[in-house]
Image (spheres, rainbow, N blue to C red):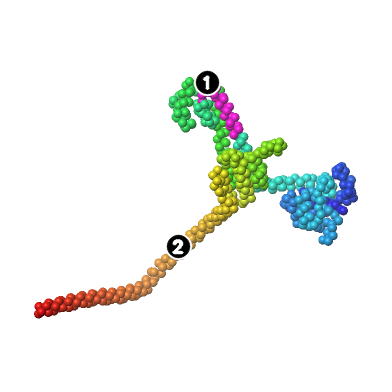
Amino acid sequence: MALYLLYESASGYSLLLAHGLDEIGQNTEAVRSSVLDLNRFGKVVKLVAFNPFESALDALNQCNSVSEGIMTDELRNFLELNLPKVKDSKKAKFSLGVAEPKIGSHISEVTKIPCQSNEFVLELLRGVRLHFDRFIKDLKPGDLEKAQLGLGHSYSRAKVKFNVNRVDNMVIQAIFLLDTLDKDINSFSMRVREWYSWHFPELAKIVNENYLYSKVAKYIEDRSNLSEDNIPGLTDIIGDEDKAKEIVEAAKASMGQELSPIDLINVQQFAQRVMDLSDYRKKLYEYLVTKMNDIAPNLAALIGEVVGARLISHAGSLTNLAKCPSSTLQILGAEKALFRALKTKGNTPKYGLIFHSSFIGRASTRNKGRMARYLANKCSIASRIDCFSDRGSTIFGEKLKEQVEERLDFYDKGVAPRKNIDVMKSAIESSENKDNMEEEEPTGASVKKSKKKKSKSAGAADAEAMVEDKSTSAADGEAEEEPRSEKKKKRKSVDEVKGVDKADVVLSTEDAASAKKKKKKKSKDGAEEELQAEKEIKKKR
């Protein structure tokens, strides 16, 4: 069976045929020794076809595709054009040797060309790479090296290109520097205490904090010059007037030795350096918080910026952390204990770096392992959301944190937590609502602008109409007075009619009232006559 070799160089694709090889007795050592001799290797391997790249950009695209295991259209056309055609019903009488198994599997899937990648093929390709300039006759000396250098630079530059706001390497460096600063500041502060205690040993017991101790030591300088006038200044530094008075009293009866001015100057300078390092440490922590909110907002909202940064640093990148299963994330940072337990067949560790989270400390002793497992699960989800989502938001991190809080209550008090699917649905709805609100804001602004434009245009039209009215009013003044007088006459006639109607209504109401009064009078007169008639009848009896 014939063996073809696909070699990807910086200048183009090459297809070579390796003939005269005994497939049954393929010896890698023999091939390795024969590769160095061009006379022997040139008889076995011969060039079949060469397809140069069109430009440096084309070479970069082809290199990226090959590194990712993807066959481009150019490579497919090159192989189909120069390799023997394979019928669907028959088996191929040749095979293609490639350096990368990924691209070999992709070629065999798409084109049905059998591919192989083993030590024998790799040794042959190593020989091709060694003597490649001899196979291509048109190549000038130095052209291949220039092409390799240019492609290497462009490939590295393309790999380094990323979103500047989501650079997890900055977080890794910041957390390393933060841990180093903590150690250095602690050791330097102890050195300041030890150095200045030769002069003022009682101060170390009064002021416990390292930063404040350095600040007070720089302010006091020589304890013999300390008096009650310095109490306000000490109070501003310490924040406690009683401690300031205690320092002044201790300085009066101190057991420390006297220091020369040059020694005091060195102590003050070193104390100032420690203070500067402490201030820089605070700024670095603020920088780390802002970077974590940009890179991994959900992970920072769930477990905190420092612990999240340590997890990213230990995994190598946010992508690597997102690829880790929750069981691996749970014991990140406890690899020594894990392998020691596996070697001695003891108990494996329950937690690694996530032990620094407040959730593990709040859980009871029997529930720390459960809590670590549950927290690692949620951290894995948060890191994947941060790594693969286009927009950064803390909605999912806050919801996951609520779930962890509910799980703590469940372990302590027995309160049943919400289901994960319900929490995720609410998080998705809130994120969609937030996106809709962000989309509506620019549309509202454009509507306001259009309204303003319409009002301006309407105002301009009104102004033009007013100008036209003013210009025509002078010429058509008489013509306008006639319709106005006619309107007045019509209004007067209407008012007269209305007045007549009102008068008729008033008269009709007055007639009705007088008629009622007459009826009442008639009824009263009839009643009086009846009473008189009854009285006369009684008298006659």
Residue 473 shows in the view: yes
Q: Nearer the viewer, residue 477 or 58?
A: 58
Q: Is residue 515 magenta?
A: no
* Foreground: disc 2 or disc 1: 1
Determine crowd level at label 1: few under 14, some 14-19, many 20+ residues with C-alpha closer than 10 A: some
Q: Residue at x 79, y 48 (%)?
A: 99
The residue that label 1 is drawn on is: 256
Given residues 37 and 384, the one toward you in this image is 384
Give the residue type at disc 2: Gly
Residue at the image point whose x is 62% and y is 48% from the top: 381
The correct choice, above or below, for 182 with respect to 54 in the image is above
Q: Nearer the viewer, residue 147 or 238?
A: 238
Residue topped by disc 2: 459
Question: In the image, what residue type sits under mark 1?
Answer: Gly
Q: Position of residue 374 (x, y in %)?
A: 61, 45
Residue 52 in the image: state x and y as whole percent: 78, 53
Of the two numbered discs 2 and 1 on the same chain, state the one appearing first in sequence. Answer: 1
Start and end of the magenta stretch? 182-203
